[in-house]
Image: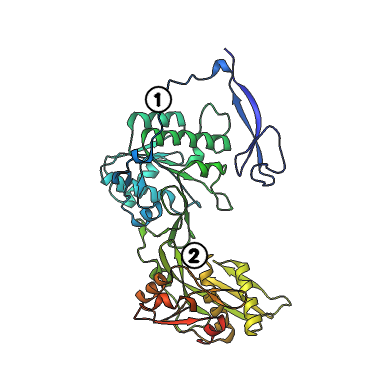
Amino acid sequence: MAKGKNTTVFFCQSCGYESGKWMGQCPGCRQWNTFVEETVVTRSAGNRIKMTQRAENKPATLSEISLEEEDRISTHMQELDRVLGGGLVKGSLTLVGGDPGIGKSTLLLQVCRNFTLDKREVLYVSGEESLKQIKIRANRIGDFNGCLKLLCETSLEAIQEIIRRTKPDVVVIDSIQTMYREDVSSAPGSISQVREATGVLLQLAKGLNISIFIVGHVTKEGTVAGPRVLEHMVDTVLYFEGDRHASYRILRGVKNRFGSTNEIGVFEMEASGLKEVSNPSEFMLSGKPEGASGSIVVCSMEGTRPMLIEIQALVCHSNFGIPRRQTIGTDFNRVNLLIAVLEKRLGISLGNCDTYVNLAGGIKIQEPAVDLGIAMAIVSSFKNKAIDDKMIAIGEVGLSGEVRAVSMVQARVQEAKKLGFTTCIVPFVCKESLKEITGIQVVCVKNVGDAIAYL
């Protein structure tokens, strides 16, 4: 019988493009220096596994397809259900990525505990930790029943056989970079192994209607390690973000075939595990200084959820020829644009001043609706005049200095009213849509100069 032959090929780390030789630029994703060399086994025709006869598959019309409420499983964690689009879909493949120590395994173990309380069979497969290590974490989280099965294994063939034999409702793979197939000669964690392992798990999820969670390591750029095709193969991609030295964590969906990708979930890390934060606005504003210049509260929309965040600015005279500009949590180029607008339209000279902008709490926001708040915080620090602690600013600032409309302004104002704010500065074009809101003073401005007048 003909034996397998080892062949050297090159894979693109970004998109998984395969080539017989090394190339500087990938033809698929146009990225430079992304090809890595790997050895694969090519099997001859006599050594290939024969495919079994498949059942006849017929196309169906949309009217013949029925959706039931049982197709989604509640995780009993409202923040996670929000990001998933209303719960975990049966037969789905979900990828969870995040920095080391951020709490990925803790989150999934808590989810497994909630599933077992509903008498659902759960299989937790770990390729990184021993059974005793998982037991220590489980004791910290709470009580578990016998519906949770633990398995320490890295061989994908053995895992596949156990899943087919036991047929659990939910499976957790921690992590995909430690799984390997024996017929692939590459090392665990390589592009070939990750792609093949994900393909096997995808077939198990769809074929047996099992919901599978996959934990993925991330690179220094913050993306899931392995080929980019990994994110294309799965149904849902979730990123666990946050400073590991801070108490809060943010779960963000970047891909979801069953719901929106604009929702986020907020958690707080405690000794007993992750605790849901039902009111993230109040959580983010805790510790805000009173009567300090350069501080203002803005409202950002994360999907359908409004979040109030404090923006801090510090403007001081520069001791060097070139002033420093530094931002934390927002776009650096956007802040430079707003500084240029303030200099050109309002005549405020910031060319000889260092400017620092920070979003308190370590959260990152790229939404243009915080432009007006950043501009007001910079001017407040420059003039050393404090902004009213009960004032909030919402609006996008254009190059002409105009304040432009933002989406879902009613929800933003209602959130500010709920947390006790008395004044809300909004774009003038949103005046008609806010007529019915009472209990909070709504100030409509046409340009950034009108907003600065309220300092």
Binning the other alpha carbons within 10 Å of mark 2 as few (below 14), some (14 to 19) or many (20 upward) gives some
Name the image colouring.
rainbow
Question: x, y (%) of residue 270?
Answer: 37, 59
Residue 151: quarter of image: top left
Disc 1/disc 2 C-alpha distance (Å):
52 Å
The residue at the far top in this view is: 1
Residue farthest to the right, as pictured: 321
Residue 59 sits in quarter: top left
Question: Which residue is drawn at the image coordinates 48% and 61% (left, top)?
Answer: 245
Q: Which mark is residue 363?
A: 2
Q: Amino acid at mark 1?
A: Glu
Q: Which mark is residue 147?
A: none
Residue in the foreground of this view, choosing between 348 and 219: 348
Q: Judging from the image, what secondary structure is the residue with disc 1 in?
A: loop
The numbered disc on residue 56 is 1
Helix, strand or loop for disc 2: loop
Position of residue 82 in the picture relative to residue 219 (left or right): left
Residue at 53% in and 36% down: 195
Looking at the picture, how far across and down is residue 416, in whole percent? 39, 75
Across and down, in percent, residue 300 comes to: 46, 68
Give the x, y percent position of residue 111.
35, 48
State left or right for residue 184 relative to residue 55: right
Determine crowd level at label 1: few under 14, some 14-19, many 20+ residues with C-alpha closer than 10 A. Answer: few
Name the kind of residue labelled 2 in the image.
Answer: Ile
Position of the N terminus, as image quadrant, is: top right
- Whether residue 105 is visible to the viewer of this picture, yes or no, is yes
Q: Is residue 26 above or below residue 401?
A: above
